[in-house]
């Protein structure tokens, strides 16, 4: 395969995992807040949680945006941000650590795949730089 085409494919894959995890995390949170907890949560608190979740989504979108420049760093920050959020939620409510274990595992696997793609993209970028630089 042409190295430029593979570089493009690997970057697209790494960026795609970051964006997918961010969007799916937001969708799951909105489902929980507006469907699962509907009627059991104060509307003011629901609004505040939505704003917090929107901020987390912006974080993932920013990482997606900057991933072409520093793909490995952005993927690692996405994984670290995801787990920092999980740890924070577990400190606030320890029961959340055991909830949705499958989803957390899948998100982690997706972001690790993103890191692997990003590492390959950076390797290809260096190889192309040696050839054309």
Image (cartoon, rainbow, N blue to C red):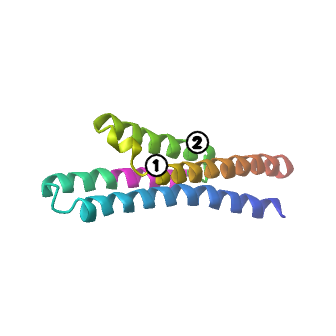
The x and y percentages for residue 106 are 54, 54
The x and y percentages for residue 51 are 26, 54
In this rendering, the label closer to the viewer, 2 or 1: 1
Residue drawn at (28%, 37%) of the image: 92
Q: Give the mark, 2 or 1, whose residue is nearer the N terminus.
A: 2
The x and y percentages for residue 11 are 65, 57
Give the CA distance from mark 2 to mark 1.
Answer: 25 Å
Start-end of magenta stretch: 55-66
The x and y percentages for residue 74 are 55, 46
Disc 2 crowd rating (10 Å Cα; few below 14, some 14-19, many 20+) is some
Q: Is residue 27 left or right of residue 109?
A: left
Quadrant of the rendered image containing residue 58: bottom left
Quadrant of the rendered image containing residue 2: bottom right
Do the numbered discs 2 and 1 sit on residues whose CB atoms are within 8 Å? no
Residue drawn at (37%, 50%) of the image: 56
Q: What residue sits right under mark 2 in the picture?
A: 73
Confirm whether the magenta stretch covers residue 59.
Answer: yes
Q: Is residue 69 left or right of residue 53?
A: right
Front residue of 122/69: it is 122
Residue drawn at (61%, 46%) of the image: 70
Q: Is residue 32 left or right of residue 133?
A: left
Residue drawn at (46%, 49%) of the image: 101
Front residue of 116/118: it is 116
Disc 1 crowd rating (10 Å Cα; few below 14, some 14-19, many 20+) is few
Dominant secondary structure (helix, strand or loop) of the stretch shown in magenta: helix
Q: Which mark is residue 101?
A: 1
Quadrant of the image containing the N terminus: bottom right
């Amino acid at each position: 395969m042409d190295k430029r085409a593979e570089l493009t494919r690997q970057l697209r894959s790494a960026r795609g995992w970051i964006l997918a995890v961010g969007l799916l995390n937001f969708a799951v949170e909105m489902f929980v807040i507006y469907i699962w907890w509907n009627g059991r949560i104060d509307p003011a608190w629901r609004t505040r949680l939505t704003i917090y979740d929107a901020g987390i989504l912006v974080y993932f979108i920013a990482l997606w945006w900057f991933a072409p420049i520093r793909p490995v760093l952005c993927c690692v920050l996405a994984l670290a941000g995801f787990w920092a959020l999980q740890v924070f939620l577990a400190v606030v409510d320890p029961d959340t650590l055991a909830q949705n274990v499958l989803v957390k595992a899948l998100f982690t696997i997706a972001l690790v795949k993103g890191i692997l793609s990003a590492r390959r993209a950076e390797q290809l970028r260096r190889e192309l730089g040696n050839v054309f630089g």
